[in-house]
Amino acid sequence: MIHKKTKDGKYTLRTATPADAEQMEEVQRICFPTLASHELLTKAHFANHIRIFPEGQLVITDHDKVIASSSTLRISFPKLDHTFMEVTDNLWITNSHIPNGEWLYQFDIGVLPAYRGQKLSTELYNTQQELVKSLDMKGQILVGMTIGYARYKDQFSIETYCEKLKNNELTDPTITPQRKAGFEWVQPIYHYLDDPTAGNCSVLMVWPLEGVSFQEYIQ
C-alpha cells in the first residue's frame, strides 16, 4: 500500500481506505457538476472499489481532508468504442475488474478546484505508473473527458474539437495535462458518457511502460 508525501511536501498521497469513501463522493460531485446523475460515483461505489481492488484506489489529503482521488481497475485492453458504464460494470467494477488484467484502467480522477494547478493529477498518474511496474502490468489506460468543449460548442462540432486537440491547435483542461503527463492519444469515443457540455465525449489514451507497444490492440 502507498503512503507518501507529495513532491512539495504539503500533502499526503496514499491508498484509499473505506473511511475515505464519503469524501471521495464529495470530490466527485464537486468536480463533475454536469455529469448525468446516474453516472456519478457514490460512497457505496467507492467503498466497493476499495474492497475489490484496494491498491488501485488513491487519495491525496490535506491533513484529514480528501482533496483529490483516483479510481482504477485492472482489465484486458478494451474494445475501442466502449462506454464508461460498460467498463465500470455500471460503476461497481465487481464484474469488470480482472485480477490479473494486464492494463490499469483509470476511470475516475478529481482534484478539488481550490487545489488545482499544483500538478496533483500528475502525481497520481506517476504513482499509478509505479503501481503498473510493481504489478508487472503493461501500462495505464484512461478516457479523458473533453471538458473544454463547453467553450467551443457553438463554434464547431465535437469531432472538430477533438481533431484540433489532437493536432495541438487547442488545449483542454483535462486532455492536455494528461498528454503532458505521458499518455498517448488513441482516439475519441463520442458516446462514452452522458455529459452534453463535454459533447458526451472522451478521448482514449494509453501510457505503456517503456518497451511495451499498444499498437497491436488498435489495428
Image (cartoon, helix red, strand yellow):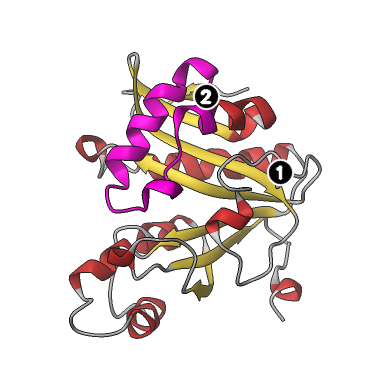
Residue at image x 19%, y 84%? Answer: 155
Q: Where in the figure is residue 172, as x and y percent of width and height?
A: 30, 65
**Of residues 115 and 25, the one drawn nearer to the viewer in this rendering:** 25
> Would you name the residue on which mark 2 appears?
16
Q: Amino acid at mark 1?
A: His
Residue at image x 35%, y 53%? Answer: 35
Q: Secondary structure at mark 1?
A: loop
Q: Quadrant of the C terminus?
A: bottom right
Q: Which residues are magenta?
A: 17-46
Left or right of 151? Residue 119 is right
Q: Is 149 above or below relative to 138?
A: below
Question: Residue 47 colored magenta?
Answer: no
Left or right of 104? Residue 198 is left
| Residue neighbourhood size for the residue with mark 1, other residues' Cα within 10 Å, grouped as few (<14), some (14–19), many (≥20) | many
| Residue neighbourhood size for the residue with mark 2, other residues' Cα within 10 Å, grouped as few (<14), some (14–19), many (≥20) | many
Question: Where on the picture, by quarter, is residue 59?
Answer: top left
Q: Quadrant of the N terminus?
A: top right
Q: Amino acid at mark 2?
A: Ala
**Of residues 73 and 214, the one drawn nearer to the viewer in this rendering:** 73
> Would you name the residue on which mark 1 appears?
97
Q: Is 71 above or below relative to 188?
A: above
